[in-house]
Image: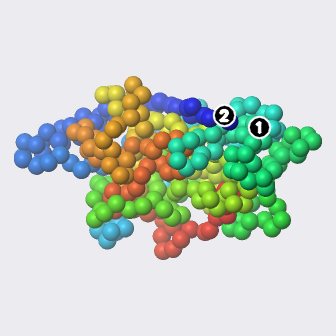
């Protein structure tokens, strides 16, 4: 069964911003050391790191209360909800049309433990074998045509909290075009991260952060629920898909939105978690993975302070857990966001 060995990647002129931020952090660290203080926990969120077009409107500074009860100052801004770097972080493809389709006609799927599958025709054909369940039959045995629900109907199904009775074994996709190019979301993130009393799980329905290209970092997908309905809400090569509630969002990091290039060869920045800590790609420019990460996938260094590294492609999360008190999305404030059905979670 084919596996995806790499995803999309990209660079951006935010390189100069990243260098400037690193230099600023280094200066602060040296000043703290001179005063006998420890290095800063984190540099803090820098709106200038985002790609042009990723943020819609102005960035506001507001008073806020974080998840742990801390009252502090936050940035409030609206993200585009679609890749501002479509050349290096393209949307789609998702469902292949036929069991004879090649990998260029389909997206990806994850096992949640570090294996990222290329969803070509062969993958769909072998679902019953992969999941040891003969109920999987997502194609016409005579024509090889795969059952795909897409377009406006695909988005409707992706946003339905209930499975469609008597109708399963389909591949689902909700194109950005059907959502008007993306769904904007307003996020409130602490300007400077506040360490939490203890790490917090990513579990739940809330988004976990924002990518530098304006795309949401989604929560872990409920894989067991999705698979139990014999459907696939296929991800594209960037590890994302869409629904009408949350729009286009990442579930796993495959190499897209690697915009914040680091002059010292450190892994590029890909975004910020909801607690304000920066998230960097899994590997540095030489392909090395840090070997001293904590339970949340984080580490500290003098240039960047505390920060996360992305989990491996195929792991059902962007990073491990929250080490800081979280901000929030305004549309999620005061209650859970609308429920989402298994196919397009």
Residue drawn at x 51%, y 31% is 10
Secondary structure beneath dot 1 equals helix
Residue drawn at x 50%, y 38% is 257
Q: Residue 280's quadrant in the figure?
A: top left
Judge from the rendering whether residue 217 lies leftward or rightward of residue 182; answer left or right: left
Q: Which residue lies furthest to the left in this view?
A: 35
Measuring from the top left, give residue 159's x and y in whole percent.
Answer: 69, 62
> Mark 1 and mark 2 in contact (Cβ < 8 Å)?
no
Q: In this view, does 34 lie above or below 7?
A: below
Instruction: Return the mark for residue 2.
Output: 2
Residue drawn at x 69%, y 60% is 228
Say whether disc 2 or disc 1 marks the residue closer to the N-terminus: 2
Q: Residue 157's quadrant in the figure?
A: bottom right
Q: Name the residue under label 1.
A: 121
Q: In this view, does 204 lie above or below 99?
A: below
**Which residue is nearer to you in this view: 59 or 234?**
234
Residue drawn at x 39%, y 43% is 309
Residue 327 makes an appearance in the image: yes
**Which residue is nearer to you in this view: 112 or 135?**
135
């Amino acid at each position: 069964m084919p596996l995806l060995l790499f995803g999309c990647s990209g660079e951006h002129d935010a390189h100069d911003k990243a260098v400037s931020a690193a230099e600023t952090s280094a200066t602060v660290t040296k000043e703290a050391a001179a005063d006998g203080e420890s290095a800063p926990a984190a540099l803090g969120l820098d709106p200038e790191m985002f790609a042009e077009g990723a943020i819609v409107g102005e960035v506001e500074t507001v008073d806020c209360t974080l998840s742990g009860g801390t009252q502090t100052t936050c940035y409030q801004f609206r993200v585009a909800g679609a890749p501002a770097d479509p050349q290096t972080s393209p949307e789609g493809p998702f469902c292949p049309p036929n069991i004879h389709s090649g990998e260029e006609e389909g997206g990806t799927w994850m096992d949640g433990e570090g294996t990222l599958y290329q969803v070509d025709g062969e993958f769909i054909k072998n679902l019953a074998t992969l999941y040891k369940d003969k109920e999987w039959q997502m194609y016409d045995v005579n024509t090889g045509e795969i059952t795909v629900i897409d377009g406006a109907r695909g988005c409707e199904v992706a946003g339905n909290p209930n499975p469609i009775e008597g109708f399963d074994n389909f591949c689902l996709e909700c194109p950005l075009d059907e959502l008007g190019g993306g769904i904007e979301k307003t996020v409130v993130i602490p300007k400077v991260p506040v360490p939490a009393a203890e790490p917090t799980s990513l579990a739940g329905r809330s988004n976990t952060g924002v990518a530098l290209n304006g795309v949401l970092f989604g929560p872990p997908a409920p894989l067991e629920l999705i698979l139990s309905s014999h459907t696939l809400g296929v991800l594209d090569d960037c590890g994302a898909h869409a629904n009408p509630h949350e729009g286009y969002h990442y579930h796993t990091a495959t190499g897209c939105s690697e915009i914040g290039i680091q002059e010292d060869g450190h892994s590029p920045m890909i975004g910020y978690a909801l607690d304000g800590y920066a998230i960097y790609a899994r590997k540095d420019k030489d392909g090395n993975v840090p070997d001293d990460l904590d339970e949340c996938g984080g580490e500290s260094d003098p240039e960047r302070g505390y920060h996360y590294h992305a989990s491996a492609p195929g792991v059902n999360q962007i990073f491990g857990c929250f080490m800081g008190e979280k901000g929030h999305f305004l549309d999620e404030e005061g209650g859970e966001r609308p429920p989402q059905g298994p196919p397009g979670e």
